[in-house]
Amino acid sequence: MEASAGIRARPGAWAGLEKPRGGGAYSARVPAVRLTAEKLPPRLALGTDPRRSADPVLRAAKLKASCCKKPAGTEKVHYSADEALILQQKAQDVLPYLDGRCVYLVGMMGSGKTTVGKILAEVLGYSFFDSDKLVEKAVGISSVAEIFQLHSEAFFRDNESEVLRDLSSMHRLVVATGGGAVIRPINWSYMKKGLTVWLDVPLDALARRIAAVGTASRPLLHQESGDPYAKAYAKLTSLFEQRMDSYANADARVSLEHIALKQGHNDVTILTPSTIAIEALLKMESFLTEKAMVRN
């Protein structure tokens, strides 16, 4: 089952690239997911029938239908001209080895999986999914924090596993997973049908980023009073200790510390999402080419 992306590259052209008036950075329109789906009765939309079928083919069809209910909007991701060229070149290098397989981004909360995932989807000509958003859509609740509050973390994890199972039957997707998706071995069995990429961000940088925007949308952090940074750092450290071995199962690791050092500094906070996406493509290419050599 294949998902159709909103933008495809034209021969000899950079897909979606726009030159703004008066010069400056290029920008690429990143469409929200627009999947072609069969017309299904309303009761078959994912999350509306309590007797949801266990048949993965039927559930995948429901998932596709649920993502087509609303017109897709667009967001802009800005690149410099040099970054756009490198992204295009590296994507073309990776695509033959990917052969339509999905890309799953894993990593701690706040690590940039959604932002980087949208860039990768754009340059690869793939569609983009955020698994948390699909769980929200599946259960009919508008936020992960509210799902935790009204039900439980276990309820959320069960639905997360079902969403990942459905996505694993599709092709040509970039999926940003929730930070805790890696803790269940069954989820790895789904994600390993594609390529898994770990965005490894220092905990200090994550804590500062999360403290700056607040923890209201982070149910595992939004529990105790106190200094936002100290609270975020302590909880992130605990979570990472529980998950680090699971993150290490990923096929490719993108270390922001390593990227910063290559640029001659140690400040990961100044790295742009496009720079991280370029490194992700390099790591994906390295893993895939090594795997191809072993097979041959």
Image (cartoon, rainbow, N blue to C red):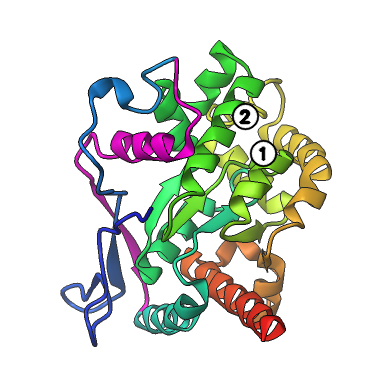
Residue where numbered disc 2 is placed: 157
The residue under label 1 is 180
Q: Give above or below for 163 relative to 14.
A: above
Residue at image position (60%, 20%) is: 155
Callout 2: helix, strand or loop? helix
Q: Nearer the viewer, residue 138 or 207?
A: 138
At label 2, counting other C-alpha atoms closer than 10 Å, the crowd grade (few under 14, some 14-19, many 20 or more) is some
Q: Are marks 1 and 2 in contact (CB under 8 Å)?
A: yes
Q: Is residue 214 left or right of residue 185?
A: left
User: In the image shown, does 126 or 56 lie closer to the viewer?
Assistant: 56
**Magenta-colored stretch includes residue 10:** no
Left or right of 191? Residue 52 is left
Callout 1: SS: loop
Q: Percent x, y for residue 49?
A: 38, 17
Whole-percent x and y of residue 289? 62, 82
Q: Is residue 202 left or right of residue 194?
A: right
Above or below: residue 250 compared with residue 259: above
Choose the circle earlier in sequence order: 1 or 2: 2
Question: Quarter of the image containing the C terminus?
Answer: bottom right
Residue name at image x 68 percent, y 65 percent: 251
Amino acid at circle 2: Arg
- Residue 199: image location, x then y, percent: 63, 59
What percent of the width, then of the height, locates residue 179? 63, 42
What amino acid is at disc 1? Answer: Gly
Residue 63 lies in the magenta-colored region: yes
In the image, which residues are magenta?
Answer: 51-80
The 10 Å Cα crowd at callout 1, few under 14, some 14 to 19, many 20 or more, is many
